[in-house]
Structure formats: C-alpha cells, structure tokens
C-alpha cells in the first residue's frame, strides 16, 4: 500500500497500479523505501565508499532549523550528527570518502568517527559541490572554490547571483538562479540560458552527467544537442543522488527511495 501511495505521488501517469516500479533513463527499476518521515529535506549526497547517505532537513521544533542526518542504506540504521548550526548543504569527495557540510557558521568536515571538524570558512553556506575541489555558494549568492585552505571566486561566475551549481564531464558549469537554469563553459564568461526549466534540484551522476529535477519530471543534459532530454516522469523530487552502480536514490515527499535495476520490465496492458 505504501509503494502504491509513493508511486502515485511521483509519477505523472499511473495506469492500473499493477507495476510497482518506475522507468528511469530507458531502464526499469523497482522501488525500495529506505526511510520515511524526513521533514523538508534540503540536500542529499551518498558516500559510495560506505553506502551512507547524508541529508539535511528541518527539525520539527518551535524554531525550525536544519540539521544533518545520515542513513546506512544497507542496514537502514539512521542517526543525526550534531554540532553544525542550520546545516544546509552536503557533498562528498568520492575519491577519499570525505564528507563536507555547510551551515550558517561556515564549512565543516565529518571525520571517520562522525564528529564535526571546522574548516577555515565562516560564510553562511547555501550549497556545496565537489569536483576535484570543494565549491560553495554563500548567502550573498557568490560562487567560490575552496582549495588548500583558501576560497577564491569562481571566475566564470564572478558578479553572477548563483544559488547552486555543478560541473559536468564536458567542462560546463550549470547553475541556478531563482530556480532558473543557466550554463557557462569553464574558461569563458558566455552564459547560456535554459530558462524554460524551473529547477527544484540540480545534480550529477557518477559520470558527472548533469540532471535536473522539476515538477514535470527528471531531465539529463544532452551535450550533443545542447538541450535537456527527459529521462523520467518522476516529479516533485527534493533531492537526487546515485550509488556506485549509477542507480538513482532520491527524496520525494518525506520518503527516501532507492531504485534497484531489474532486467524484466513491467507492462501495464
């Protein structure tokens, strides 16, 4: 019953409810609800080294604030990491398995004992991304690269208001401003618009292919056509990440859902 409810929430077309999975990028996946009851999830990242998914979400308190939680997707054991005020963003250095978190008081790293370590940045962090270095945006909507203990402005985005950005496998920076999508090539200042999309979440897969989550479904960038192709009717996603097999894991409503690839598709005749 819970699976039926979830599918009705996340698909725009749902026929006779016989199929319990979904199509994503021309592949058929079964759904596994690995966590429920997550209030207003803000960001999500999966550490592919230990199968822990980290997420920031709002507490149900008189004065709402964002905290950092994590979940072992194998054992489904969950916990909260305290010590970061208004934790907003999370990202992973997948090569070393390092977890970085941004909050109202700056940048932090989570060590192997799940303890918080402060980094020398005190900006109010709004988003994070890791691609060979740590990138962040702050409350002034400025984009920075953090490396060797220092933060420098991302030159391609200097003077541009940025809410979130990622870097793809073709040296493109995709970024959002007020949920509108834009693109700029590394080493240039020529900004291209993809404003036809209203973006709820922006991410990349294990191959650094960019994806956007919208109210109409999930789209992946086609670098040969310079457009986004629809890969799923799955709508209303609050976050999207991928495991080491490039299978999606996402947040919808108050659920965390893991997709498992199946070779046998389902047909609703």
Image (spheres, grey):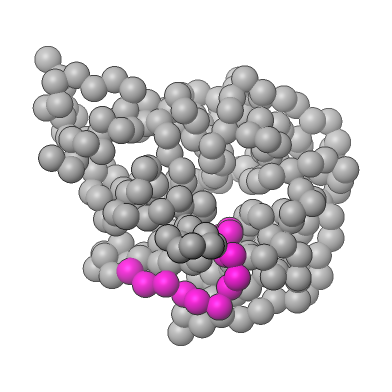
The N terminus - image quarter: top left
Q: Report the front residue among 120 and 260.
A: 120
**Which residue is at 76% across, 70% downward?**
122
Residue 258 in picture, x, y percent from top left: 30, 49
Asked whether 83 falls inside the magenta stretch, the response is yes
Q: Does residue 234 appear to the left or right of 161 in the view shown?
A: left
Which corner quadrant of the image does residue 35 belong to?
Answer: bottom left
Q: What stretch of residues is rendered in magenta?
A: 78-93
Rendered view: 187 above or below 256? above
Q: Report the front residue among 64 and 240.
A: 64
**Which residue is at 25% across, 38% downward?**
6
Rendered view: 8 above or below 204? above
Rendered view: 214 above or below 157? above
Residue 152 in picture, x, y percent from top left: 84, 60
| Name of the residue lying farthest toward the front | 62
| Name of the residue lying farthest toward the top | 269
**Which residue is at 37% across, 72% downward?**
79
Asked whether 45 falls inside the magenta stretch, the response is no
The C terminus - image quarter: top left
Q: Report the front residue among 75 and 141.
A: 141
Which corner quadrant of the image does residue 91 belong to?
Answer: bottom right
Q: Does residue 54 appear to the left or right of 150 in the view shown?
A: left
Rendered view: 191 above or below 62? above
- Residue 264 visible (yes or no): yes
The total number of labels drawn is 0
Residue 107 in picture, x, y percent from top left: 67, 69
Residue 210 in picture, x, y percent from top left: 56, 39
């Amino acid at each position: 019953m819970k699976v039926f409810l979830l599918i009705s929430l996340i698909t725009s077309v749902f026929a006779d409810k016989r199929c319990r999975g979904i199509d994503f990028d021309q592949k058929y996946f079964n759904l596994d609800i690995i966590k429920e009851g997550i209030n207003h999830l803000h960001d999500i990242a999966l550490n592919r080294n230990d199968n822990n998914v980290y997420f920031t979400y709002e507490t149900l308190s008189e004065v709402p604030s964002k905290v950092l939680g994590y979940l072992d997707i194998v054992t489904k054991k969950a916990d909260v990491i305290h010590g970061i005020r208004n934790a907003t963003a999370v990202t992973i250095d997948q090569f070393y398995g390092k977890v970085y978190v941004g909050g109202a008081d700056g940048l932090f790293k989570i060590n192997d004992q799940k303890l918080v370590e402060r980094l020398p940045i005190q900006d109010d962090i709004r988003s994070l991304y890791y691609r060979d270095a740590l990138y962040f945006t702050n409350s002034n909507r400025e984009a920075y690269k953090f490396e060797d203990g220092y933060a420098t402005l991302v030159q391609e985005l200097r003077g541009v208001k940025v809410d979130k950005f990622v870097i793809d496998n073709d040296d493109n920076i995709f970024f959002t401003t007020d949920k509108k999508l834009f693109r700029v090539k590394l080493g240039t200042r020529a900004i291209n618009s993809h404003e036809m999309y209203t973006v709820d979440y922006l991410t990349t897969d294990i191959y650094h292919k960019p994806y956007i989550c919208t109210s109409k479904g999930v789209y992946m960038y086609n670098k040969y056509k310079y457009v986004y192709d629809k890969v799923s009717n799955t709508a209303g996603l609050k976050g999207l990440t991928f495991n080491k097999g490039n299978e999606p894991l996402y947040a919808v409503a108050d659920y965390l859902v893991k997709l498992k690839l199946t070779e046998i598709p389902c047909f609703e005749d």
